[in-house]
Structures are given as structure tokens and as C-alpha cells.
Image (cartoon, rainbow, N blue to C red):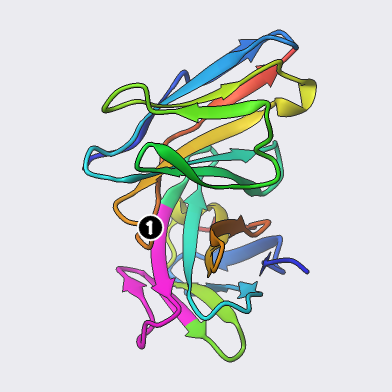
């Protein structure tokens, strides 16, 4: 089974509107962390937001918020007030804290295009 | 804002040759990582490094690969006897702690001919 699943290969959003990028994860470990990264066409990876499995509240960073639903094992990224510069690939990632150590997994990504 | 820097940005190497990819992590970070991303595919974890030794590695990180922190600032990934399928973008990342967000460098694009 995939550790991280991103079911939306491509998404379009109108400028200034909000968009939700889906991410589900699979782990049996109680301790884990979830990350979202942005990869523009230039190729660099930019950290956006982090949610720990024990965090009580959903993480927020500026226009980014993480809709963390632990029972559903989902960690969707919400981008509010989309901007043209938000057009990029977005990767959901997980750090899994097992007895044998930490492993890191990335999803296949969602390509977001912001339309003016 | 401090950032992770990687050199070179693009490396072209003949198959069978050895290549060393260099990274300077953020100075107060203690954990270092290498990832690779084959063109058009997802990012794959290779190895994590802490306290001058490998803390975790994936199945991809076999005997062909090695990492080193030769001095107080650099963190290197060595790939011996390169193969065509080693062509990828290689990202270095660092984090302050094991459970802190990882900050990535801009990557080194490795092309094996």
C-alpha cells in the first residue's frame, strides 16, 4: 500500500479563490509528522506547513492551512486567496516514527494551476 | 533567512564514473538528508544523517552510495560507478531536530551519459 496518496494529479483554481489539495496517508505508528512542500517549475522544494500526529490543532501558516483528520488519515492542504505564484507542484510527505527509526515518504504530487 | 545550498546545480558524468554531490546545511541544524527525484516522479528518501553517522537509509541507498560530513559545514553524497538510472535531481535537506520540518536545497541535477 502507498504510504502517501495524492489523488489529484492536476488542479485548477481561479485567482483569489481557495483550493484544497488532498492527501491521505497510511501508517500504523502513533507518532508521525505530515508535511507539505511546493515545487515550482524551477525545481526547488519549498517547505510550507507541518502537522505532528499529536498536535491538537490544525496547523496554519499564512495562507496555508492543513485540514488534519486523524481518524480518516487525511491531511489536506488548503490554500486561501490563491495567487498566480502559487502555480506549482505540491507534495504531501510523511515522517513515520517506527521502533526501528524514522522513514520519510512523499506522494506523487498535485500540479496546481492558478488561472487569472 | 538561512538556506541549504547545494553544488553543483547541474552535474554531467559518464556512466561508471564516481560523482560527489555537495551540500551545506543550515548552520544550526543537526539532521541532514538526501533525497532524489527522477524526472516526473515523486521524491524518494535516500538517507538521513545525525551525529556523524547514518541514522536511517532506504532500500535505494545501497553500497553504491555513501555520505560524509568531511568538515563542520559540508555534507556530501558520493555515488560510485554511476549508472544511467542514477540520473535524477538530488536534494539535500536539513532540520533542527528529528521532528522538525526539513528545509531543502535547490537540488543538483545529475545527468549520466
Q: Position of residue B105 (x, y in %)?
A: 41, 37
Which residue is found at the position 63% from the left and 79% from the top? A28
| Left or right, A57 with reference to A103 | left
Which residue is found at the position 43% from the left and 39% from the top? B53
- Tell me the chain of label 1: B
Q: Position of residue A40 (x, y in %)?
A: 51, 44
Vertical placement of residue B88 versus A51, above or below: above
Disc 1 secondary structure class: loop
Specify the quadrant of the image occupied by residue B59. top right
Which residue is found at the position 43% from the left and 69% from the top? A16
Q: Position of residue A67 (x, y in %)?
A: 48, 81
Inspect this view and state whether residue A18 appears.
Answer: yes
Magenta residues span A47-67
Q: Position of residue B82 (x, y in %)?
A: 71, 18
**B83 and A81: which one is in front?**
B83
**A87 and B48: which one is in front?**
B48
**B110 and A26: which one is in front?**
A26
Which residue is found at the position 56% from the left and 67% from the top? A13
User: Which residue in the protein does label 1 denote?
Assistant: B98
**B113 and A19: which one is in front?**
B113
Image quarter (top left, top right, bottom left or bottom right) of the C terminus of chain B: top right
| Left or right, B54 with reference to B64 | left
Q: In the image, is residue B15 part of the stretch drawn in magenta?
A: no
Vertical placement of residue B108 versus A103, above or below: above
Amino acid at each position: 500500500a502507498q504510504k502517501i496518496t495524492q489523488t489529484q494529479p492536476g488542479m485548477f483554481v481561479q485567482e483569489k479563490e481557495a483550493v484544497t489539495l488532498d492527501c491521505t496517508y497510511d501508517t500504523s505508528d502513533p507518532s508521525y509528522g505530515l508535511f507539505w512542500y511546493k515545487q515550482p517549475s524551477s525545481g526547488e522544494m519549498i517547505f510550507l506547513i507541518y502537522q505532528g500526529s499529536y498536535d491538537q490543532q490544525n496547523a496554519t501558516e499564512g495562507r496555508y492551512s492543513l485540514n488534519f483528520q486523524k481518524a480518516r488519515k487525511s491531511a489536506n492542504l488548503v490554500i486561501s486567496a490563491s495567487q498566480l505564484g502559487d502555480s506549482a507542484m505540491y507534495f504531501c510527505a510523511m515522517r513515520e516514527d517506527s521502533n526501528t527509526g524514522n522513514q520519510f515518504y512523499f506522494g506523487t504530487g498535485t500540479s496546481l494551476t492558478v488561472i487569472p | 533567512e538561512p538556506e541549504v545550498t547545494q553544488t553543483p546545480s547541474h552535474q554531467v558524468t559518464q556512466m561508471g564514473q564516481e560523482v560527489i554531490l555537495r551540500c551545506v546545511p543550515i548552520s544550526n541544524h543537526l539532521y541532514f538528508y538526501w533525497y532524489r527525484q527522477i524526472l516526473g516522479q515523486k521524491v524518494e528518501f535516500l538517507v538521513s544523517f545525525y551525529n556523524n553517522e547514518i541514522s536511517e537509509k532506504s532500500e535505494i541507498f545501497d553500497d553504491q552510495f555513501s555520505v560524509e560530513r568531511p568538515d563542520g559545514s559540508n555534507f556530501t553524497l558520493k555515488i560510485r560507478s554511476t549508472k544511467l538510472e542514477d540520473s535524477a535531481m538530488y536534494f539535500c535537506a536539513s532540520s533542527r531536530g528529528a521532528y522538525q520540518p526539513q528545509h531543502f536545497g535547490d537540488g543538483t541535477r545529475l545527468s549520466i551519459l
